[in-house]
Amino acid sequence: MASQVKPAPAAPGAWVEPQKIDYSALNGDGSQEVEHFDGSAPIYQWNDDFGDVGPKFEALELELFGDPETRHDRAGLDFSKIEQISVEQEGPVRIQPLRTFKDAALHPVMAENIKLMGYDAPTPIQKYTIPSMLQGHDVIGIAQTGSGKTAAYLIPILSKLMGKAKKLAAPRPNPATYREGIDAVTAEPLVLVVAPTRELAVQIFNEARKFCYRSMLRPCVVYGGLPTAQQISLLSKGCDILVGTPGRLVDFISRPHILTLRRLKYMIIDEADEMLDSDWNDELSQVLSGGEQDEGNVKYGLFSATFPKAARDLAKDHLSAAHVRFRVGRAGSTTENIKQVILATERDEKRDTLLRLLNQMTGVRTIIFANSRREVDNLDDFLYNMGLPVTSMHSERTQKEREAALRSFRAGQAPILIATGVTARGIDVRNVMHVINYDLPSMEHGGIEEYTHRIGRTGRIGHRGLATSFFDPVNDDSMGSVLTRTLLETKQEVPEFLQVYLPEGDAAVHLRFETESDYDPAEAQGQEQANGTSGNDSWGGGQAEDTNGTGSGWGHSNTDAATSPAPANNGWGGEAAPTAPAPANNGWGGKAAPAAPTAPAAPTAPTAPTAPAHANNGWGGEAAPTAPATTSNGWGGEPAAPAPVPTNNGWGAGAQTVSVGW
């Protein structure tokens, strides 16, 4: 029953005074000055009197990096466990991880900027990605949200380009004497970063502003929702590092007098799974094919928290076979640093419960997620009328409204932000201490992956955070099972009303998730039927290297190289040597030798997540012990010599990997 007591207003002094926001005032005729556009934030600009490295500007340095006294506070609270976090890599080249940023031998200006950022030690994804990109490899990085992926690719790319801007970059006007419309040039970036949302694009641009400080590299950002004239004006001054959303990038690429990619050296796809899920396929393909470069001249990086089949197909089409691939923790997982509290709350009890939470944990940045734009607007009005400092954003708001809301939230003027999932991807606002899922995401619209990205707004890069979710027994029943497994995986307390969803037996010991990044039931089933052999997963059984020395996580573990000579393959599915008794399909199109006899596969158990299977089911079924096979890993790893195929779960069940949360 809903409470009949009128909700108590916010306690006086617990929150800052609320400020009424007139959203209509932000919806003018589009003639606002460029300074109201987030992408026009100040950047370091060179003039002809400087060499490849410019002098310091104290005022800009303070704006970019903040108070020197508090810069190192952002390093996090729980990095004592950083060495225990499992990182797995696969590919033909073994990457030696960094221990400190000094090990990377970065450009002196980049090393100084890292200090100004307050970064004391590299995060796990940075330890492996930085040396990989410095060595010139294409990279796939799969890491938990809030793990430092943006810096992982910006640091090595910009470090390699620093000191070379005048040699590599296109001619550009001197900003000190620039004349609008007269001195304009075509933007010819050296680096392109593609992001799925406007907010994430602005965030990456802001990181690039910091890392480009004192270099001659000029960062820019383009995205929809704003008049193109403002962004064209900025591009016309020259651009070396371009961040953008797919739609606006395609628009500008189609106008080659504004933007061309003929000088491109690096292309980064950030949050690739989100773009592929959001029907950006056509636009993304146009961007990826718009480099005007010979094959191999552009280095690619693909970064995400999950890695579904569509993303793997994208990688196969565009990345070099000799790329490296890293995974930090289970793909799509969350971290132990976020305390997750699930409250049984019927729909008509939610507002009372929300007010109680806000009055219990006061004065901290809080994000409240709702599933509909109408609910966001209603909650905004409700909390403002209760005396709380609140702002809100959703997809029907104009870009100026969304930017104003985020600025107000970041500045602490409105420390309570209500939003739909538009902000769930990649937004990194410091000191978000509490995330509240007023509505849990439905299984049809994001499910547990959406939940993971939402709560990942807190507990960023080693900090601790709190995530509270309202579980409606009527509407959220479909989320019960996977939510319970997520709580178990991250060592959280499972409330009594969710214990009916607890897995039993082996399923409780070896938790399995439908969203694991390379599990595709149709793909696994198709391969199994086509091959008639075991020892196959959606990546191909491969030589997986656990770079922390704990075992494999991308395919079955490899046998010792000294005792397992094997023919080389082409890294994308070349056939095994014809003398192999039964080469297994690598998942990318490599075919088994047609005349080679194969041992009959063991009977296949049903492919439900908890069911054991003797043929490959993508979840850890063992291969038939008598079926020798050589397996090509499809990514450049060498096939193993004929031997009994070890257990394979698509992530390395046979390995001794120990995953430790943040």
Image (tube, helix red, strand yellow):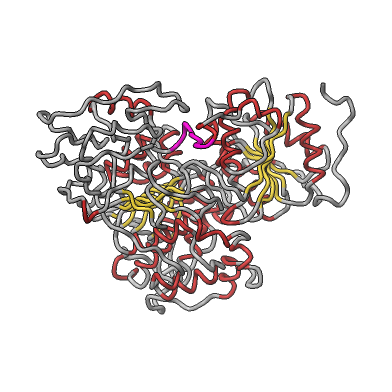
Instruction: Give residue 546's position: percent from left, percent from top.
Output: 38, 53
Quarter of the rendering containing residue 102: bottom left
Write the residue at 58% across / 56% down.
462
Which residue is pictured at 32% across the width and 22% down the height?
603
The residue stretch that appears in magenta: 509-516
511 falls in the magenta region: yes
Q: Decide which of 209, 70 is in the foreground and name it.
A: 70
How far across and down, in percent of the image, does residue 549 sit? 40, 57
Asked whether 251 or 648 is in front, the reply is: 648
Count of marks, rendered view: 0
Name the residue at 36% across, 35% down.
310
Left or right, residue 618 beside residue 33: left
Determine if the magenta segment contains residue 2. Answer: no
Q: Which residue extends farthest front?
A: 626
Q: Where 19 falls versus 120 (above or below)?
A: above
The spot of residue 569 in percent (x, y) is 17, 46
Residue 120 lies in quadrant: bottom right
Which quadrant holds the N terminus?
top right
